[in-house]
Image (cartoon, grey):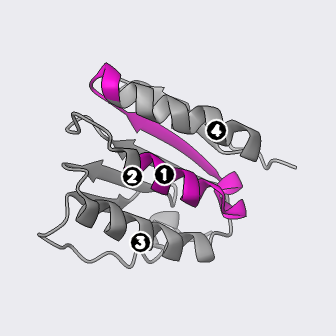
């Protein structure tokens, strides 16, 4: 079996946006956000939509939002839009936050996407998020 971390990422760093992404060893992605500006959110939406098109296996993604102080309404709307894609049922997502305001926004997303089958957890500790992501994956029917 090939190393899942070798799956193409199609990521090009851009100094005008406030997030980076790297491939995880399990084939998923680690996102680190430094801002939630509209430019960043639009770029993230486009990048994520492209990756959902060829989603073919169970994947774990980690979103590090510890540097985000406030989650804009637009971020919640884009996350809900992306979560409506049937491919998100193949994703286990851990979101690491640093404050209660961001937690409230992420909790809205969790509450609205749970019926769609997206598995998402909210954490304040990155090690706990990784442990949760590393549980065995099972295909949802």
Please tell me the numbered disc located at residue 47: 3
Q: Which residue is pictured at 48% across the width and 38% down the height?
A: 94
Q: Secondary structure at mark 1?
A: helix
Q: Position of residue 122 (x, y in %)?
A: 47, 29
Q: Is residue 76 magenta?
A: yes
Task: Tell which tag, 2 or 4, sits nearer the viewer.
Answer: 2
Q: Position of residue 102 (x, y in %)?
A: 34, 31
Mark 4 touches mark 1? (CB < 8 Å): no
Hey, which residue is sitting farthest right in the picture?
141
Q: Secondary structure at mark 4?
A: helix
Quadrant where the N terminus is found in the figure: bottom right
Q: Which residue is mark 1?
A: 77
Q: Which residue is mark 4?
A: 112
Mark 3 touches mark 1? (CB < 8 Å): no
Sequence-wise, the earlier of marks 3 and 1 is 3
Hey, which residue is sitting farthest front in the picture?
73
Which class describes the residues within 10 Å of circle 4: few (<14), some (14-19), or many (20+)? few
The quarter of the displayed image where residue 90 is located: bottom right
Q: Which residue is mark 2?
A: 74
Cα gap from disc 2 to disc 4, whole angstroms: 15 Å
Cα gap from disc 3 to disc 2, whole angstroms: 16 Å
């Amino acid at each position: 079996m090939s190393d899942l971390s070798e799956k193409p990422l199609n990521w090009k760093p851009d100094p005008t946006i406030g997030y980076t992404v790297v491939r995880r060893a399990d084939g998923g992605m680690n996102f680190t956000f430094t801002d939630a500006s509209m430019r960043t959110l639009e770029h993230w939406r486009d990048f994520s939509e492209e990756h959902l098109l060829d989603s073919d296996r169970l994947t774990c993604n980690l979103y590090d939002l510890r540097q985000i102080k406030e989650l804009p309404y637009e971020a919640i709307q884009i996350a809900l839009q992306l979560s409506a894609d049937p491919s998100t049922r193949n994703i286990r997502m851990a979101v690491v936050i640093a404050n209660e305001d961001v937690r409230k926004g992420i909790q809205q997303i969790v509450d609205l996407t749970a019926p769609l089958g997206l598995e998402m957890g909210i954490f304040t500790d990155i090690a706990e998020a990784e442990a949760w992501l590393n549980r065995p994956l099972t295909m949802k029917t």
